[in-house]
Image (cartoon, rainbow, N blue to C red):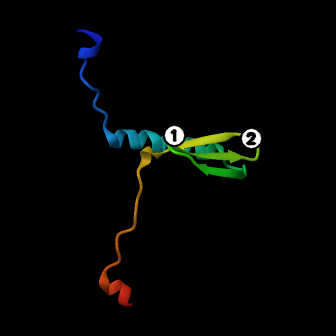
Amino acid sequence: MKPDDHPLLEIDPEALRAAEFMQAQELLGGMVGRRIVEARLEDTRIAIETDDGSIYYFYGFMGEDTPEAAAPDAAAT
């Protein structure tokens, strides 16, 4: 097989989100007791700097959760 003949790797998006979520939990656990002095939204990640000078990077693989639109009855009450 030539290097250019290999099939593309298939990556399960849910597995990628789960792995990123576990990594984010570990990073956040290590930040307990520290103060955030700066947070930046960059093109491909979020950078968080703590008061000890450490910078933590979070990437957008986890997805997002948006609230569902309110039902018409709920808006009236």
Residue projecting furthest to the bottom: 77
Q: Within 10 angstroms of label 1, few (less than 14), some, or many (20 or more) residues?
A: few
Q: CA distance from mark 1 to mark 2?
A: 20 Å
- Of badges 1 and 2, the one in the foreground is 2
Seen from this angle, which residue lies furthest right?
52
First-in-chain label (1 vs 2): 1
Q: Nearer the viewer, residue 64 or 43?
A: 43
Crowd around label 2: few <14 · some 14–19 · many ≥20 (10 Å): few
Percent position of residue 10, x then y? 28, 31
The amino acid sitting under disc 2 is Gly
How far from the left and from the top, in percent, is residue 14? 34, 43
**Circle 1 sits on which residue?**
23
Choose between 34 and 1: the one closer to the eye: 1
Q: Secondary structure at mark 1?
A: helix
- Give the residue displayed 69% in from the left and 51% down from the top: 38
**Which disc, if any, is residue 53?**
2
- Decide if residue 21 is on the left or right side of residue 38: left
Give the vertical position of 17 relative to 10 (above or below).
below
Residue drawn at point x = 31 percent, y = 80 percent:
71
Q: Quadrant of residue 30?
A: top right
Q: Nearer the viewer, residue 32 or 65?
A: 65
Could you tell me which quadrant the N terminus lies in?
A: top left
Is 18 above or below relative to 1?
Answer: below
Is the residue under label 2 in contact with that under label 1 (CB below 8 Å)?
no
Q: Give amino acid for label 1.
A: Gln
Percent from the top left, x then y, of residue 6?
A: 25, 18
Instruction: Judge left or right: residue 70 versus residue 44.
Output: left
Q: Quadrant of the C terminus?
A: bottom left
Q: Residue at x 42, y 55 (%)?
A: 64
**Figure label count:** 2
Choose between 1 and 56: the one closer to the eye. 1
Check disc 2 and report its element: helix, strand or loop.
loop
